[in-house]
Amino acid sequence: MIHSILISRTDSIGDVMLTLPMAAVLKKHYPQVKIGFIGKSYTKPVIDTCIHVDEFIDVEDFYTKDIKIDGKIPSAIIHVFPFKQIAKRASNLKIPLRIGTTNRLYHWTTCNKLVRLSRKNSSLHESQLNLKLLKAFGIQEEIELQEIANNYGFSKIEKLSAEFTSLIDPCKFNLILHPKSQGSAREWGLDNFALLIQLLDKKRYKIFISGTSTERALLNPLFNTVGNMVTDITGRMNLNQFISFIYNADGLIANSTGPLHIAAALGKHAIGIFPPMRPIHPGRWQPVGKNALVFVLDKSCNDCRKNPAICSCIRNISAYEIQHKLDEIIASTL
């Protein structure tokens, strides 16, 4: 009898976000099961926000401690993000059902249930690919991409502090721009973000610039150009409060990053800027939410494959088109 299941996804925030629907589907088929989520410590606030996850397990604790849920060894573990050390540890812990993919050789010796899954050339979205691993439980249902938005369970939102609540302007469209990606994605460029800021009507928009404290210095060229037109919130909030700030804002624009997926899950106007290159194209990584959309050029993207720092396929997306879309969004909400 399955009483608890561990989901292992120890990479970045965006990857974790697109794994959370797996917990919802498991709860649908096993209403009484407890779901544990193994992740890195910095993703804990994201995982704690999901109503479908019962327990967060820091990956460092997984390596060194006896892992039990409700006093019992977990019934199963799903290696969503394959990692050899985690797979070996799960085997040593004698977790009864250990699910991995056939294309990781170490899974053949550490897992006892293998699922054939190839992500690289698939036409499916990352969130849909994750759900394919549930075949190990006999769960075969296909979920349309637009339905993924109903399965985040991303609703345990911390109250926003008075300090940050005071920054929100109830009479304007509060727009967060998140220009950097900590190297995880191709970037639209600070010059494009600066142009967009200059195009937006400040009587209708309040614009925030977000980012980590380590990205603040990288954003100096942007602040030097448009600093008087924006509110700088880089490095000012922990992740719990940043999630709450996104929840209280109206929209967010970013490259393919975690905050983009958080905004989409919260039902905000989440606008992603992507290159058309596989496997980093929006077909695989677009934000999924009722108000999410992407900008991507309709072209073959190969010339800059070996030079991601200067990617014309993303940099040539027009700031004027994004400004026009934002104005349409405001007009439709009046």
Image (cartoon, helix red, strand yellow):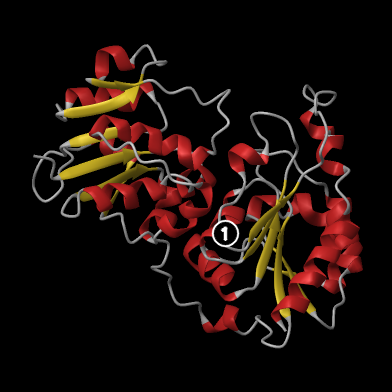
- The type of residue carrying mark 1 is Ala
| Left-right relation of 295 to 7 | right
For the point 15% across and 43% down, which residue is it? 68
Q: Quadrant of the C terminus?
A: bottom right
Looking at the image, which is closer to me, 58 or 138?
A: 138
Q: Is residue 22 above or below residue 84?
A: below
Q: Is residue 32 left or right of residue 10?
A: left
Vertical side of 271 occupied by 36: above or below: above
Callout 1: SS: helix
Image coordinates for residue 195, horizontal then vertical, percent:
91, 59
Q: Residues within 10 Å of mark 1 (few under 14, many from 20)?
A: many
- What is the x, y in percent for residue 52? 31, 57
**Vertical placement of residue 60 versus 301, above or below:** below
The mark total stands at 1
For the residue pair 260 and 116, the one nearer the viewer reads as 116
Query: x, y percentage for residue 79?
Result: 34, 31
Residue drawn at the location 18% of the way across and 40% of the way down: 67
In percent of the image, x 71 and y 49: which residue is there? 180
Considering only vertical position in the picture, is 97 above or below 295?
Answer: above
Residue 170 shown left or right of residue 240 in the figure: right
Which residue is depicted at the point 48% across and 49% down?
17
Q: Quadrant of residue 209?
A: bottom right
Q: Which residue matches tag 1? A: 264
Q: Position of residue 326 (x, y in %)?
A: 78, 67
Dividing the image into 4 quarters, which one contains the N terminus?
Answer: top left
